[in-house]
């Protein structure tokens, strides 16, 4: 698909943000790697072409809608506006790392908070930067704070006995992680790594607790997010177990066939 962006933004920057938005969707395959290129310069606009592959072509329309939603929030929070959004230029020029309230207003779980509660979070959060490939959270470590992706994409992996590392999901701008350890008090249940260069907002436990004590809906939203992430983890683990069983059965069959051929040749 194609998207037009005002020429006032550096092409490399725009390509990075569009790429982040695309790979943040779990519908998109990482291999072959999605490509974002400048197709043409059209006066004051640049036309970018995106080429990517999806898991199920029958879901093409659903995937396109999901990607456009991801594109909107990634571009919006990066201060980049598509060519047709001229009237919104003033609103979109602020980068989310300089004005975190832009992001909090986009995240569903924070929409139930009062303005004062959001301002308290913005005042106390930490902005952290991670280069591609660096760990943000490690499975098994302690920690009861929340994170919001402000730019880029993170990948959540789980290490289990008997299996290789399993990718649970990818998260992009406006999505939250770390809520499981925060709500349960348990150790971190998975690794979280920067899939691209990322900026995250790190919110300490005591800052969140102030809002939890005042706002029941906020707690319910966090609890819903926890259930959603747990269900997705269970689904991915079941898929991995099925693949592992099928691989073992396939190897066993190959070995039996090879043994038969050996004995037949003798």
Image: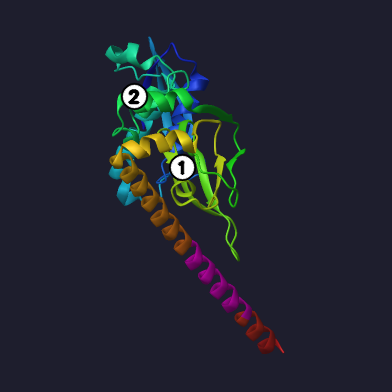
- Vertical relation: 167 (above or below) 4: below
Residue 239 seen by the camera: yes
Q: Main secondary structure of the magenta part?
A: helix
Asked whether 203 falls inside the magenta stretch, the response is no
Residue 31 seen by the camera: no
Q: Nearer the viewer, mark 1 or mark 2?
A: 2
Residue at the disc numbered 2: 116
- For the C terminus, the image quarter is bottom right
Please provide percent x and percent y for residue 115.
31, 24
Question: Left or right: 254 with respect to 206?
Answer: right
Callout 1 secondary element: strand
Please provide percent x and percent y for residue 108.
32, 36
Residue at the disc numbered 1: 177
- Do the numbered discs 1 and 2 sit on residues whose CB atoms are within 8 Å? no
- Vertical relation: 202 (above or below) 138: above
Earlier sequence position, callout 1 versus callout 2: 2
- Vertical relation: 116 (above or below) 187: above
Residue toward you, 109 or 37: 109
Please provide percent x and percent y for residue 196.
54, 34
**Rendered image: mark on residue 102:** none
- For the N terminus, the image quarter is top left
Query: In the rendered structure, which segment of residues is drawn in magenta?
Result: 240-255
Question: Farthest right residue?
Answer: 266
Identify the residue at horizontal 34%, vertical 43% (top origin).
Answer: 219
Identify the residue at horizontal 59%, vertical 77% (top origin).
Answer: 252
The quarter of the picture where residue 234 lies is bottom left
- Vertical relation: 79 (above or below) 183: above
The quarter of the picture where residue 131 lies is top right
Identify the residue at horizontal 42%, vertical 45% (top origin).
Answer: 26
Callout 2 secondary element: helix
Identify the residue at horizontal 50%, vertical 66% (top origin).
Answer: 241
């Amino acid at each position: 698909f194609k998207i037009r962006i005002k020429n006032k933004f550096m092409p490399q920057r725009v390509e990075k943000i569009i790429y982040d938005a695309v790979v943040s969707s779990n519908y998109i395959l990482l291999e072959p790697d999605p490509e974002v290129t400048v197709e043409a310069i059209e006066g004051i606009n640049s036309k970018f072409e995106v080429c990517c592959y999806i898991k199920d072509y029958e879901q093409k329309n659903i995937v396109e809608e999901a990607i456009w939603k991801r594109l909107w929030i990634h571009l919006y929070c990066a201060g980049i506006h598509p060519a047709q959004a001229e009237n919104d230029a003033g609103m979109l020029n602020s980068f989310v790392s300089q004005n975190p309230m832009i992001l909090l207003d986009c995240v569903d779980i924070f929409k139930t908070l009062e303005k004062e509660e959001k301002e308290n979070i913005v005042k106390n959060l930490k902005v952290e930067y991670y280069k591609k490939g660096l760990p943000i959270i490690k499975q098994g470590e302690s920690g009861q704070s929340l994170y919001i992706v402000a730019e880029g994409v993170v990948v959540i992996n789980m290490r289990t006995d008997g299996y290789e590392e399993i990718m649970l999901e990818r998260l992009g701008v406006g999505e939250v992680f770390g809520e499981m350890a925060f709500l349960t008090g348990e150790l971190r249940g998975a690794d979280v790594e920067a899939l691209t260069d990322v900026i995250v907002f790190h919110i300490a436990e005591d800052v969140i607790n102030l809002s939890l004590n005042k706002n029941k809906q906020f707690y319910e939203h966090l609890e819903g997010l926890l259930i959603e992430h747990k269900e997705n983890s269970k689904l991915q683990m079941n898929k991995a177990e099925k693949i592992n069983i099928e691989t073992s059965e396939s190897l066993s069959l190959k070995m039996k066939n090879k043994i038969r051929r050996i004995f037949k040749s003798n």
